[in-house]
Amino acid sequence: MFNIKTLLAASALASTALAHFTLDYPTSRGFDDDKEPQFCGGFTTVEARQPFPLGQGPIRIDSHHPRASVVAFISTSENPTSFNDFNTTSSGQTIPLATPVFQVASGDYCFNVNLGSLNVGLTNGSLVTLQVQYDGGDGDLYQCTDLVLIDGYTVPANETCTIDAATSNATASSTTVPSSSATSSSGSSSTSQASTSPSASSTAASSAAMAQREITGLGLAASLLGLAGLAML
């Protein structure tokens, strides 16, 4: 029979093991588990830009939680330094989300984005930064990748995505997110937006209000699922 000390130790070990996600394709700027709650996962310097399709292209992540909410968004700034750079272009045009908010379990997942279809003036050679926001119930985590968009670019054959997690597990429609107040590049998700949303599975309008770019309520549903899992121990 497990005693309380054993149970708590096992719970702590499980929490450590499930503490993050990785952005595997395109390659992220870097990974530091302790910094992942920060803007761009704590890596605030633009890295060498990787070629990526102007049309549809795949993103691949490795989820380390049994249930998590995911969304992706882009900045058209050559050197984004805050979440606001993912809200609007330099001319003030609002940038739509690159994906809907969707759910994943643990393991490898891929999803497709079509950045050229966002109607924010992207063309062959455009420089963008894509940021993935992930919440498995213990707070928002982030990873960034720096890209140069190439019309007609063909991704490696082993990176193509045929089972798109963003369309098969979507919980909200892809929407345009209103511009929000500035967020420091070193700030965590708790400092993002004053207003909150009830869950990631709310309507498209409420999901827009969640984005940290601003998506502050992203993990509520995952948190409830996590609590239900602990109750079953």
Image (cartoon, grey):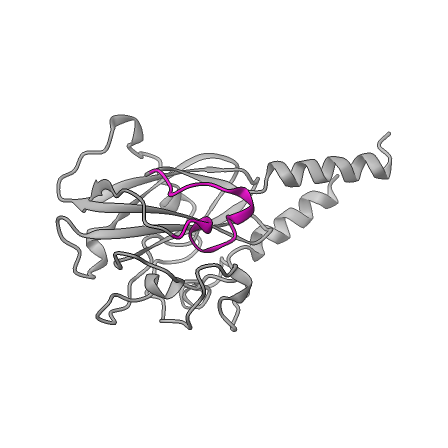
The picture places residue 27, in percent across and down from the top left corner, at: 35, 38
Front-most of residues 198 and 45: 45
Residue visible at 46% across and 61% down in the picture: 215
Q: Quadrant of the N terminus?
A: top right
Front-most of residues 97 and 46: 46
Above-or-below relation of 209 to 53: below
- Residue with the most extreme front position: 45
Residue visible at 56% across and 46% down in the picture: 34
The picture places residue 66, in percent across and down from the top left corner, at: 57, 39
Quick check: 185 left or right of 13?
left
The picture places residue 186, in percent across and down from the top left corner, at: 48, 59
- Residue 162 visible, this orientation: yes
Q: Quadrant of the C terminus?
A: top right
Quick check: 150 left or right of 217?
left
Where on the picture, by quarter, is residue 111? top left
Q: Main secondary structure of the magenta part?
A: loop
The picture places residue 113, in percent across and down from the top left corner, at: 29, 47
Identify the magenta region. Answer: 27-44
